[in-house]
Amino acid sequence: MVAWALLALGAGGVGCRRSRGRSAAPNTSASPGDTRDVRCVERPEGCIWCEGRGATPPLIEPDAIPPSLCDPKNPGDCVDFCSRLAPDCAVPWHGGPSCLLPNEQEFRREIFRRDTADRPEATVQGRIADEGGRRIDGAKLRVFFQGTGILDESSGKDGSYRLRLPAGPWTYSLRVSHPGNAIEIADLRIDRGGTTVRNFRLSPESSIRGRVTSVAGDPIAGAAVHAVRSPDDLVDAGDATSGEDGSFVIGGLDAKRYFLRASKFGWLPEMLKWGVNAPATRIAFKLVRTGVIEGRVVDAEGEGQGNATVVALPSAGLGNAESPIIWAADSEGKFAQDRFEPGTYYLWGRRGEMLVFPPEKIEVSGDNLDAQIELRLSHRGARVRGRIVTRGGAPLDPATRAVLFGLSPLALPRKAVGDIDREGAFTVGALLPGRYEISVRVGPRVLPIVSGPREVEIPIEPGATVDLPDTIVVRPQAEE
């Protein structure tokens, strides 16, 4: 289950990230062997994350520009990756079965099924009844593993159910629900194969009622309200959506204490600091409005650029270590992101080698919390080509990569990364004008540069190619 731990990084989105421009740094790790037991999903920032058997470290840092894999018959059709694996089965032009899952939940389910396929099977069975002992037909049972639903079943006419699950040293969560009855959530730990008997008796349901409003008291419709047994629980005991008047009703609850959380796009989420004992009424959420930046990424002709990357940086972050905010446009080039504090932001856009330059400036203020902008991709990024060798001639580690850090405040605030081939040659692309620091890395380790260029200047001409005049010589890891 080592691979499962990597899922904490998160993923989301559907579809495949496609770029019209040729990749400046094609991912050379794609190979037929990589497709075995591989599962992939698109992350919110638009790149494809793939998991193979065992622990696979990321190829680059989360805020680095991902390498790409392009269609050999159409070099302008590319997919960005943000993992070491870049299998052909994750790209749209692949002729065989796809390993790209449609969403985060299905990705997690597939990883779980793959990693437990060789585990012994255990059976959990029993009956579901109400407090009077009457057996319940059609009760819904859902099994979760670390918050992801992996199995759904229903009870029969006699209230009986049967679940088949992989046995192992982990804990499942089982949620049992039926209209008019309280939801029951239980932990299941099945270390070995065999049969476990677990009966459930559902009590009559209670409810929690309340209202979601702004700080000024205006109703907020469409807010999601969730109830959990403890703030750290991954499985909801109940949920509801607020109506036009801001009111909500969470049913199916037991007469216990719950913690409530309300959220909606464009508003800061709120978790009530105290528990609420069901049944309860007049529970109040007062959400605080947050800044939203939305708009569209287009090309020079005004056509929407689907799945383009959008980067926002607070003006105070220029030249500082403040992290940029990165997300992806939809299939039509439209984007929207919230949680922005009032202030000035600089926005970049990128799709393939086409970028926004100079960055667009936008204000988010109390009078303009919904900021609108159009990002036009009109500048073709430059490339830097060079060669890296080790002192003494030892071969480079296959995971070695060239990383360029922008020293100009107008450069895209993301590291630019290039793979290095067997001869030490590399290409780093999608670069905006300005000065960059050159770094050679193996994972988090930086290899000291003994001789050769340490910085490079990118001219303002679009699409320029800069060839480093000298070979970069680094100290090998064995000497550290």
Image (cartoon, rainbow, N blue to C red):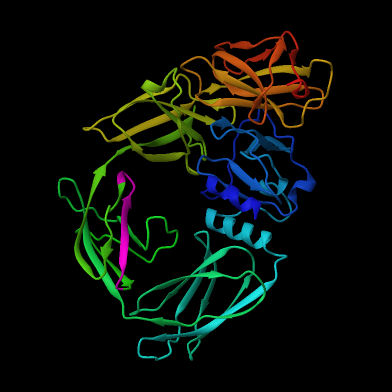
**Which of these two is toward me, 466 or 212?**
212
Q: Where is residue 108 shown, x and y percent of the image? A: 58, 56
Q: Where is residue 327 shown, x and y percent of the image? A: 47, 38
Give left or right: position of 63 versus 75.
left
Give left or right: position of 235 versus 161.
left
Q: Quadrant of residue 393?
A: top right
Give left or right: position of 408 versus 464.
left
Q: Where is residue 274 shown, x and y percent of the image? A: 26, 56
Q: Given the current orientation, which residue lies at the most extreme left position?
A: 216
Q: Where is residue 443 shown, x and y percent of the image? A: 66, 31
> In the picture, which quadrant includes the C terminus?
top right
| Camera sees residue 92 | no
**Which of these two is toward me, 48 or 359?**
48
**Which of these two is toward me, 78 or 393?**
393
Look at 68% across and 39% down and name the residue there: 84
Q: How many marks?
A: 0
Give left or right: position of 76 versus 64.
right
Task: Give the magenta part as a residue range.
Answer: 255-268
Q: Quadrant of residue 293?
A: top left
Magenta region, main secondary structure = strand
> In the picture, which quadrant includes the N terminus?
bottom right
Q: Is residue 391 magenta?
A: no
Look at 70% across and 71% down and name the residue there: 120
Q: As displayed, is residue 273 above or below residue 430?
A: below
Q: As displayed, is residue 115 above or below residue 423?
A: below
| Camera sees residue 329 | yes
